[in-house]
Amino acid sequence: MKPSIKSLLLDELIEELWQLNEPPYRANQIATWIYRKRVRSFDSMSDLPRPLRQKLKTKFAYTDLEIVRILGGKDATRKFLFRLSDGNLIESVLIPASPALYGSRSDRRTICVSTQVGCAYGCKFCASGLDGWKRNLSADEIVDQIIAVEQEAGERLDNIVFMGMGEPLANYENLLRAISILNAPWGIGIGARHITVSTSGLVPQIRKLADQPLQIRLAVSLHGATDAVRSQIMPINRKYNVEALFDACRYYNSRKKQRITFEYILIENVNDSVDQAHALAKRARDLEAKVNLIPYNTVDGLEWTRPPRPQQERFLAVLRNAGVTATLRREKGHNIAAACGQLRLQTERALTADFSPTTAGPIRAA
Ligand code: SAH
Ligand code: SF4
C-alpha cells in the first residue's frame, strides 16, 4: 500500500522531493494545498507541474475518511462515524462551545479524536475496550479526523482532545507524528496547549511524553485514588500502580508548564465514597492537578450506574473544601469524555438502528 501524503512531516516531504529531483519549496506548496486550501486530490494542486503531480500520485495515496453518519444537530455535540479504508469504523466527537475544558476557553470548538480501533486495556466500565483491540490508527487517519470534521462543520477547530476510542499512548509513534502535523505552522496549526492527551496510565510513555518538547496537556484517567479501588476497575493498575503513576505524573509536572487533569468517573458504590474523595483530594493537591468528575454514563451490557446527584455533589464538595480545582459535568451535551468512551457501542448501535439526526443525541442521558 502506498503511504499517505498526510502522514509525512515537512522534512520528510522535502527529502522525498529531493529524491524526485524537485526543489524543497515544492514541499511548502504541497503542504499549503493539503492543510491550508484543503484540496481533496493531487490533481487540484494547480500550481504544480503536471509531471510532478503524476509522480506524487504514483508514490503516495491522497487519503480521506469516508463519513458514514453524523449524529446530533448543528450547534450541539455532533458525532461523526467514519469508515477506514479497511472497513473498520471509528468515531470523532465535535463539541461546539464547551465550558472551559482542558485549557479551552468557553468559545472554543473541541474535537475528541480516536487513536485506535478498539482498546486493549479493558477498563471494566468502558465500551471502547469491550471487544478488545483491533489495530492502531496511522498518523494520517488521526489527522484526517480533524480535516473531515472541519470540512463538514464548515469551521476551524481550536482544541483537540485524544479521548476517543483507544489508548493514545499505546500508539505513541503515530500519535506524536499526528500531533506534529496538527501543531505545525505548515500543517493544521493548532497550539500544543490546545492539544490534550488522555491516558489510562501508561507510565513509561508518560515519561517519554514529558521528555518531548511540545507543551501538550496531559489528562490521566484515574477513576480510583487507591490501588484497591483502581485495580478493581482498571487492569492496568496491576502493572503500573497508583504510586508508579504518580511518580510519572510528578516527572511530567517537572517538565511541563500545564497542570495535569485527572479524569474521575463517578461510579456508584465503586469509587464514589467520601473516603475516596479525601484520598483523591490529597493526590490532586500533591500534584496541583485539576479534577474532572464525570457521572458514569450507562453502557449496555455493563452493570455500573452513576451515584445520585447529592452523592456527586458531596464528592465534589470534599475536593473543593480541600482546595482542589474540580468540576462536575452536569450538562449531558458537554459530557465529552463519556461520549468518547462509548464510541464503539454507539457506532454499532447507530449502524444497526434507524437513527435520525433529531432523535439520536450523541450522549444517552443516564
Ligand atoms: N484510553 C484513554 C483515552 C480514551 S477514554 C483513557 O482511558 O484515558 C476517554 C475517557 O472516557 C476516559 O477518561 C474514560 O475513562 C472515559 N469513559 C469511558 N467510559 C465511560 C463511561 N461509561 N462513562 C463516562 N466516562 C467514560
Ligand atoms: Fe481503553 Fe481508555 Fe476505555 Fe480504558 S478507558 S478501555 S484505556 S479507552
Image (spheres, rainbow, N blue to C red):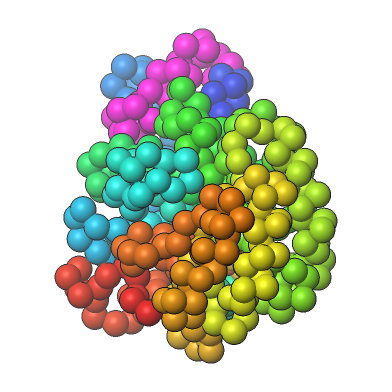
The dominant secondary structure in magenta is helix
The total number of labels drawn is: 0
Answer with the quarter of the image where residue 276 lies.
Answer: bottom right
Q: Name the spot of residue 208 as percent of width and height, x first.
A: 75, 41
Q: Is residue 246 left or right of residue 340?
A: right
Taking the spot 61% from the left edge, 60% from the top edge, the residue there is: 221
Q: Quadrant of ligand 2?
A: bottom right
Can residue 290 be seen from the camera position used here?
A: yes
Q: Considering the image in quadrants, where does the C terminus appear?
A: bottom left
Whether 338 is among the magenta residues is no
Task: Reply above or below: 270 against 217.
Answer: below
Pick the residue in front: 310 or 357. 310
Taking the spot 22% from the left edge, 42% from the top edge, the residue there is: 154
Pick the residue in front: 152 or 47. 152
Q: Name the spot of residue 320 as percent of width and height, x first.
A: 54, 56
Q: Is residue 152 left or right of residue 324?
A: left
Answer with the quarter of the image where residue 10 lies.
Answer: top right
Query: Which residues are the magenta region?
Result: 17-44
Q: Name the spot of residue 272 as percent of width and height, x first.
A: 58, 76
Taking the spot 62% from the left edge, 73% from the top edge, the residue there is: 274
Q: Name the spot of residue 51 as percent of width and height, x first.
A: 40, 21
Pick the residue in front: 37 or 108. 108
Can residue 175 be seen from the camera position used here?
A: no
Pick the residue in front: 318 or 334. 318
Answer with the quarter of the image where residue 224 lies.
Answer: bottom right
Whether 21 is among the magenta residues is yes
Task: Reply above or below: 108 against 119.
Answer: above
Q: Is residue 41 left or right of residue 317?
A: left
Taking the spot 34% from the left edge, 75% from the top edge, the residue there is: 364
